[in-house]
Image (tube, rainbow, N blue to C red):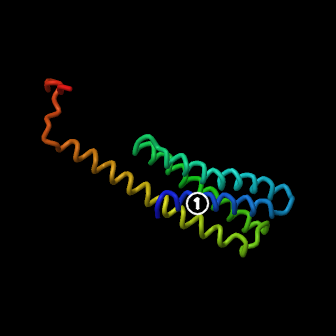
């Protein structure tokens, strides 16, 4: 899956969360949990977009960590809404499934980025150029 596909999926997830929250009953519990779901569900798309513009591998990993956390939080709010009877399981299941799939993709992206960063650091340490404070500066 490429960045553009994932960007579209996270955007669609956010829009689906908005629709789901709009359809909740108008009671205190639904309002509180719905607001939490709305925040975390829409945050996923914003944070993924931010991760695609990361300035370094460490920045990407940190931002994708936020994406993973927001998906997990969204799952919690949907689960609570469903368990409390405020949300029909038929309406929640597709969105819960998508949250699970996108969480797995986020985790895999983080692992790949960590592995790539680790390989990059290891290969730079094993280069043939000596890393010495006394090394002569490069001429430009």
Q: In this view, does 25 lie to the left or right of 1?
A: right
Q: Specify whether 128 is left or right of 72.
A: left
* Residue at the image position 55 percent from the left and 49 percent from the top: 49
Identify the residue at image location x=54%, y=63%. Answer: 102
Q: Is residue 76 left or right of residue 119?
A: right
Q: In which quarter of the image is residue 135?
A: top left
Residue bearing the label numbered 1: 8
Is disc 1 surrounded by few (<14), some (14 to 19) or many (20+) residues within 10 Å?
few
Residue 128: image x %, image y %?
A: 13, 41
Residue 121 or residue 86, whichever sits in front: 121
Residue at disc 1, secondary structure: helix
Whether residue 140 is situated above or below residue 116 in the rendered picture: above
Residue 28 x, y percent position in the rendering: 84, 55
Return the residue found at the far bottom: 90
Residue 107, image x and y in percent? 46, 59
Residue appearing at x 39%, y 52% in the figure: 113
Image-quadrant location for residue 25: bottom right
Count every numbered label the image shows and give the total. 1
Residue at point 72% right, 73% down?
Answer: 89
x and y, in percent, of residue 3 in the image: 49, 57
Give above or below for 82 relative to 131.
below
- Which residue is more in the foreground, 24 or 5? 5
Quarter holding the C terminus is: top left
Q: Is 140 on the left-hand or right-hand side of 96?
A: left
Q: Residue furthest front?
A: 140
């Amino acid at each position: 899956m490429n960045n553009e596909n994932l960007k579209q999926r996270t955007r669609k997830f956010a829009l689906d969360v908005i629709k789901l929250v709009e359809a909740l009953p108008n009671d205190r519990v639904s309002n509180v949990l719905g607001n939490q779901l709305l925040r975390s569900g829409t945050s996923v798309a914003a944070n993924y977009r931010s991760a695609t513009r990361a300035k370094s591998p460490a920045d990407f990993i940190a931002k994708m960590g936020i994406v993973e956390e927001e998906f997990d939080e969204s799952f919690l709010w949907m689960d609570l809404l469903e368990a409390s009877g405020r949300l029909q399981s038929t309406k929640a299941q597709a969105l819960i499934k998508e949250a699970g799939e996108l969480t797995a993709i986020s985790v895999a992206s983080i692992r790949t980025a960590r592995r790539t960063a680790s390989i990059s650091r290891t290969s730079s340490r094993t280069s043939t150029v000596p890393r010495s404070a006394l090394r002569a500066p490069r001429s430009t």
